[in-house]
Amino acid sequence: MPRINDHFLKLKAGYLFPEIGRRVTQFTDSHPEAAEDLIRCGIGDVTEPLPEACRNAIHEAIDELGTRQSFHGYGPEQGYAFLREAIVDHQFPGIGIDADEIFISDGAKCDTGNILDIFGPGNRIAITDPVYPVYVDTNVMAGNTGDCDREGKYQGLLYLPCTSANQFGPEIPANEKIDLIYLCYPNNPTGEAISREQLTAWVTYARKNDSIILYDAAYEAFIQESDLPRSIFEIDGARDCAIEFRSFSKNAGFTGVRCAYTIIPKNLTGKTATGMQEAIHPLWLRRQSTKFNGASYPVQRGAEAVFSRKGRVQVKELTDYYMNNASLLRTACQTAELEVYGGINSPYVWVACPEGVDSWAMFDLMLEKAHVVITPGAGFGAAGEGYFRISAFNSLENVEEVCRRIVRHLG
Ligand SMILES: *Cc1c(COP(=O)(O)O)cnc(C)c1O
């Protein structure tokens, strides 16, 4: 009988979204009249259609596949040059990122998980708390943690709490050397952004301690305030200490189409078991060439169209639409006298539960009273307790109704 990867058995049984699904089904089964009324603001998936520029580009690319002359088989391992060059020109102008440092993939979720393939055992790993669960669970699967304690924390991981007490900015460890740090800004789930000063402090720490920052910028397109960093590579010295993950999922509605990219500077290094410095870039290239065969040609053409003249306008309309939703949700929560965070530079609004209500009790209350599905903060980590997340990924009509219900039931 084959041995299994025992580390999988350490994963918490009650994974957040299945548990939400279970509670919703239980409620709608016993209250069928409420089922029709239910509005889901839980899972962070987009709702609005794919921009026309992207759809046209995908259609055309599929037609190209229809003749021998313009057919495309396996593409280049790192992704097509047309897309990598468009990314450099439009997303990193003057920042010194080379098209060769970009790896196209079918998702930032897989990239943030798969990246652990190229890092060895024994690394000291830090995550923010609350956190995007993928970073934690992939470290558990890779055997980088011990068991889960009663609070839901894995032994061996360093948790950096982000609460209203520190304005949701993780404190930089004073006397501790971390090897890998996951940072995600604008943040999922708190919706808060990181300032240039804070990010600079992290880069300074990482360079001093030979750490690598795994920087997830999946929500970069939602940044509204012009003084905020959009990429970690805007910070001097970040090329020595950072990998950045980006995605077309949230800005351009590609959650179902699948396209993302990861930036690995060529000068970034790690060390071998014997302490020798080795470049990271060739390891990831090798990993991708061996285990991955690229995003499809039509999808990469669709992603390229995000940067076309029409595509840029249409993507801006999409992000504006969701950010207007976020603004309405913030206002409704404030009207209901709830403490509200996020939602200014990201499509997530992070709300403090009323005094004495924990985040799962808040989930049940919103479900039963308002017929609105939110995400309980505790599902993102121990420091998320006492908060809940409302996603602005919804139709305006639904958001307006959610706002009315928040004011009516929580005000
Ligand atoms: C949605 C999201 C992503 C994007 O994942 P894809 O696999 O590209 O769809 C990445 N990171 C975070 C934190 C997210 O919320």
Image: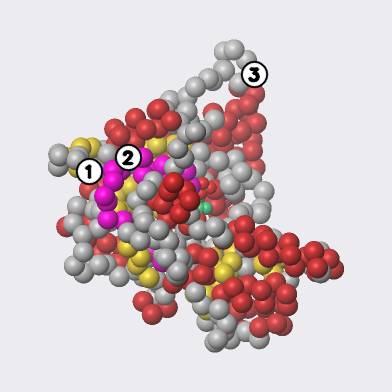
Residue 405 pos. (x, y %):
71, 77
In depth, the one of 207 and 144 nearer the eye is: 144
Q: Is mark 2 within 8 Å of ligand 1?
A: no
Q: Residues within 10 Å of mark 2 (few under 14, many from 20)?
A: some
Position above or below: 299 against 242: above
Could you say whether the residue bearing mark 1 is in a helix, strand or loop?
strand
Give whichever of discs 1 and 3 has the lower sequence position: 3
Which residue is labeled 1 in the image? 270
Report, in whole angstroms, how far the alpha carbon at label 2 lies from the one at label 1: 10 Å
Q: Which mark is residue 94?
A: none
User: What type is the residue that disc 1 sits on?
Assistant: Gly
Does the rendering let one see residue 221?
no
User: What type is the residue that disc 2 sits on?
Assistant: Ile
When asked about the image quadrant of residue 389, the answer is bottom right
Quadrant occupied by the C terminus:
bottom right
Residue, far left? 275
Could you say whether the residue bearing mark 3 is in a helix, strand or loop?
loop
User: What type is the residue that disc 3 sits on?
Assistant: Gly
When asked about the image quadrant of residue 120, the answer is top left
Region of the chain picked out in magenta, as a range: 108-130
Tell me, yes or no, whether the highlighted magenta stretch contains residue 164.
no
Position above or below: 43 against 331: above
- Picture residue at 29% right of the left edge, 53% below the top: 180
